[in-house]
């Protein structure tokens, strides 16, 4: 049986949930842990989700900050029921077990309307002024893509031009910076495993604690170039068109979509390699080929020409088309 964290009984007593049955849930790629609570004493069967994000590895403060902002702007994040940020405890509304990903896998005919609703959620989010969050600026973009050379290239035994890598990204990304002011709230991990389908028929948002102010294309990329499930080119095209028709983001939007797609996918290849090599989580290796394929499509756009040249010079084609075994 999985040991429960120290302090859980004290927090649940203070929150009025001391009679609840505690069910540990599978973890994600972080130090956070989740538990489903189910009341036993009153016969209601009421449930709630308990998040443990213990310092110093985690800090629930950003999650609470973003959750309160979303709630104040009629966005469907989970309600906060109780909290003790200093000890890393947050008790939140339970959205249930139905994630967008599994729901579509079990009922493929629902894919189009569910993605359409997810697009409409982004349109609604982007109609609000950006939240009081940090900017997604050039140093942040570059720090993220550095994960590719730091982890993937090192793991693959590649001696690459790191300075040229940064310079290529700076050249490619510079044009979009002016178009992300004043910007929109970017949730950063908006994809099919972080969109819940509660029983009330809404779509609930989770895992948004890293929100920043940035470009409206970023969360669209996160959703439609999903590292965890295949999204067909036809669906991707239809959903981009749906967003553009509703939001009218401007003529350079698709170039920026490609720029941010390449940036995000390069970062994810690095992160998934790190999860395997440093954190002992090899299951992420199986996702790298999907991310590579999306990255290759993005690099075909003329806006990524400097980055594409770097990849052609520094990363052998055989490695780019591999199944990730070269870093296992």
Image: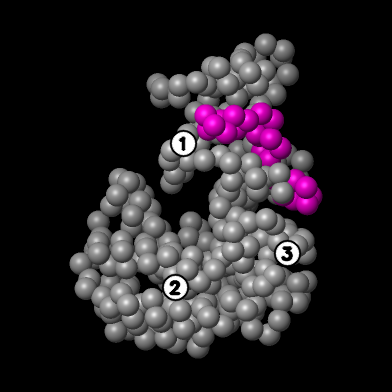
Q: Dot 1, how many residues are within 10 Å of its Cα: few (below 14), some (14-19), or many (20+)?
A: few
| Residue name at image x 68 percent, y 65 percent | 184
Residue 237 spot, x, y in % from top left: 63, 75
Work out how far the residue at label 3 is from the one at label 2, CA to CA, in angstroms: 25 Å
Residue 109 spot, x, y in % from top left: 66, 57
- Residue under circle 1? 55
- Residue under circle 3? 126
Tell me: 237 left or right of 321: right
Foreground label between 3 and 1: 1
In what element is the residue under mark 3?
A: helix
| Residue name at image x 25 percent, y 56 percent | 328
Q: Quadrant of residue 296?
A: bottom left
Quadrant location of the N terminus in the rendered image? top left
Q: Dot 3, how many residues are within 10 Å of its Cα: few (below 14), some (14-19), or many (20+)?
A: some
- Residue range highlighted in magenta: 70-95
Front residue (pair 312, 32):
32
Q: Residue 210 — which label?
A: none
Could one spot residue 250 in this view of the protein? yes
- Residue under circle 2? 295
Work out how far the residue at label 3 is from the one at label 1, CA to CA, in angstroms: 32 Å
Work out how far the residue at label 2 is from the one at label 1, CA to CA, in angstroms: 34 Å
Q: How many numbered discs?
A: 3
Vertical comparison of 142 with 196: above or below: below
Q: Is residue 211 magenta?
A: no
Q: Earlier in the sequence, mark 3 or mark 1?
A: 1
Judged from this view, the residue extending furthest toward the top is: 41
**Callout 3 touching callout 1 (CB < 8 Å):** no
Front residue (pair 87, 319):
87
């Amino acid at each position: 049986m999985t040991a429960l964290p120290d302090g859980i009984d004290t927090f649940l007593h203070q929150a009025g949930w001391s009679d609840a049955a505690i069910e540990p849930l599978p973890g994600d790629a972080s130090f956070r842990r989740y538990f489903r609570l189910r009341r036993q004493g009153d016969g209601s069967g009421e449930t709630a989700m308990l998040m443990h994000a213990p310092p110093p590895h985690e800090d629930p403060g950003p999650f609470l900050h973003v959750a309160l902002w979303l709630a104040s702007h009629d966005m469907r994040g989970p309600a906060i029921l109780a909290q003790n940020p200093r000890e890393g405890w947050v008790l939140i509304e339970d959205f249930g077990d139905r994630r967008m990903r599994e729901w579509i896998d079990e009922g493929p005919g629902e894919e189009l309307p569910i993605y359409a609703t997810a697009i409409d959620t982004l349109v609604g989010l982007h109609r609000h002024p950006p939240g009081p969050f940090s900017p997604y600026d050039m140093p942040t973009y570059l720090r993220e893509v550095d994960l590719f050379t730091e982890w993937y290239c090192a793991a693959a035994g590649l001696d690459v031009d790191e300075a040229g890598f940064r310079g290529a990204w700076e050249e490619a990304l510079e044009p979009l910076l002016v178009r992300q002011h004043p910007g929109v709230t970017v949730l950063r991990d908006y994809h099919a495993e972080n969109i819940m389908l509660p029983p009330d028929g809404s779509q609930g948002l989770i895992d948004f604690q890293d929100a920043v102010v940035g470009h409206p294309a970023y969360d669209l990329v996160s959703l439609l170039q999903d590292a965890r499930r295949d999204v067909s080119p036809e669906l991707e095209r239809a959903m981009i068109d749906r967003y553009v028709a509703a939001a009218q983001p401007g003529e350079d939007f698709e170039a920026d979509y490609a720029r941010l797609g390449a940036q995000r996918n390069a970062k994810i290849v690095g992160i998934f390699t790190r999860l395997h090599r440093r954190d002992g989580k090899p299951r992420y290796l199986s996702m790298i080929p999907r991310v590579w394929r999306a990255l290759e499509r993005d690099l075909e756009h003329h806006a990524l020409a400097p980055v594409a040249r770097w990849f052609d010079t520094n990363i052998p084609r055989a490695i780019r088309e591999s199944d990730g075994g070269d870093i296992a």
